[in-house]
Amino acid sequence: MPIEKERRVLVVFPHPDDEAFGVSGTISSYIQMGVPVTYACLTLGEMGRNLGMPPFATRETLPEIRKKELKAACAAMGLDDLRMMGLRDKTVEFEDDEKMVQLVTDLINETAPSLIITFYPGYSVHPDHEATARAVVRAVRRIPEAGRPKLYTVAFANETDHDLGAPDVVHDVTDMLERKINTLNAHASQTAWLMAEMEPKIRAKDPEALERFAKEKFYNYRWHDDFEETF
């Protein structure tokens, strides 16, 4: 479906490269449209399992490397409003809930987005993903319904692997594949092994690769009366 132009977009993810896989084509599309995009990355992903292929990072150097990779990924997308929020990787789930909600609320109040993109709580696998998703949903829920921005969420598994059904929104980002490839390659410490396999397939227009990388899928968050009970 065509990507609708927004007034402003706020993207909130916990780790460098979270944006690359599922939304970098969408981000690039908005930027090409002239839509301001703010990306709030909560940590530097300093506990990432991969150290490059072949390894070029160590546990001591990985935080700075991932910071540089994140900046390079934003440059590849054309994004110039990156917020590095300074939380520690693999500890987001232990942060105080109200602190997390306030962090997101402050971002919303400053940027006044018409659209927010994050993970779908309960369907995003990693504890840091889940904590980020909960904070965003709670912050948005506190906004009076008439004034809420749209909320697009990424469910980590394929739609056949969960009970959310088919995605509500599918963006064809074929025109942005070069930027997406460059964004993924920017996160080399974490993605080199994947891109060595997938980049040739994408460039060869392999149907499975294009389905995976050229279609970015989102769910509108389904607001529940028993919201707090679902977490």
Image: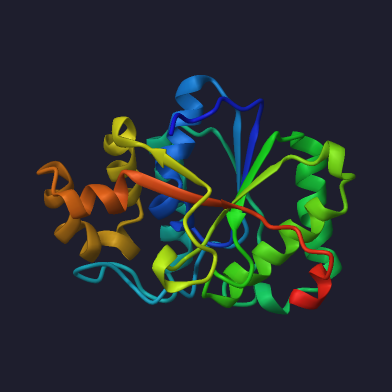
Quarter of the figure with the N terminus: top left
Describe residue 183's horizontal placement relative to residue 47 as left or right. Answer: left
Left or right, 181 with respect to 19, comes to left
Give the image location of residue 168, x and y in percent.
Answer: 53, 48
Q: Residue 194 in the image: x percent, y percent? A: 24, 63
Q: Is residue 95 visible?
A: yes
Q: Is residue 221 above or below residue 125?
A: above
Residue lying at 50% horizontally and 34% vertically, measured from the top left: 79
Q: Residue at x 82, y 72 (%)?
A: 228
Judge whether 132 appears above or below 219 on screen.
below
Count of numbered marks: 0
Image x and y of residue 221, in percent? 66, 55
In the depicted structure, whether residue 228 falls above or below residue 83: below
Residue displayed at 36% across by 74% down? 58
Residue extending farthest top: 34
Q: Is residue 231 visible?
A: no
Q: Determine whether 100 is above or below 36 in the image.
A: below
